Amino acid sequence: MEENRKITSTSSLEMVAVENLDAIRLNLLQLANKAAALAYAPYSNFRVGAAVILEDGQTFWANNQENICFPVGVCAERILLGYTHANFPDLKPEILLITAKTPDNSSSDTVTPCGLCRQSISEYERKFNSPIEILMNRPDGTLLRAYGIQNLLPFQFDDLNK
Ligand code: THU
């Protein structure tokens, strides 16, 4: 029998040490950390902060907002990208950094965007036709960097006519 043809996708993430971050990215890390500390996460206790820089250099941040009806809660990334796109629909988000705090708020926890947030990031990349750099903070003094959502969401749904 003939073998099925394979369609492959390669994803790659880069590991970056905090001490190697430039001023722009270090500032995003600080903003995201502050946002994480203010997260409203009484049910999961998992506090997430996200910070973004738009193409004109403006920075914004947000955090997760939970609800007693659990599915109503919204992740930090979608709150942030929804807000910036609502207010600055013509400005491309350049770099998105996310971080999370342990339940006692004392140190960082590992976080990567959930599936819904990956889909949301892919929407804004498509709108601006340009990849977003996604930085994911980790507790060991490094961050994971994805140049474009393709590295986190291969084979994405991006065409209603497919
Ligand atoms: N959460 C985020 O805000 N962003 C992510 O990328 C992962 C998950 C939130 C959702 C929920 O409030 C809590 O973290 C636990 O899942």
Image (tube, helix red, strand yellow):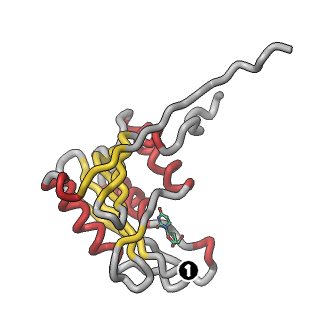
Residue in the picture at 44% in, 48% down: 121
State the image coordinates of residue 36 (x, y, percent, origin top left). Answer: 35, 74
Residue in the picture at 58% in, 35% down: 155
Q: In which quarter of the image is residue 90?
A: top left
**Which amino acid is tagged 1?**
Asn
In this image, 34 relative to 80: left or right?
left
Q: How crowded is mark 1: few (under 14 residues within 10 Å), some or many (20 or more)?
A: few
Residue occupying the far right of the picture: 1
Residue in the picture at 50% in, 32% down: 10
**Count of labels in the image:** 1
Tell me if residue 62 comes above or below residue 162 in the rendering.
below
State the image coordinates of residue 148 (x, y, percent, origin top left). Answer: 39, 40
In this image, 64 relative to 128: left or right?
right
> Could you tell me which secondary element the residue under label 1 belongs to?
loop
Residue designated by label 1: 67
State the image coordinates of residue 67 (x, y, percent, origin top left). Answer: 55, 80
The quadrant of the rendering that contains the N terminus is top right
Q: Nearer the viewer, residue 51 or 138?
A: 138
Tell me if residue 17 comes above or below residue 126 in the rendering.
below
Residue in the picture at 36% in, 72% down: 108
Residue occupying the far front of the picture: 140
Tell me if residue 65 comes above or below residue 1 in the rendering.
below
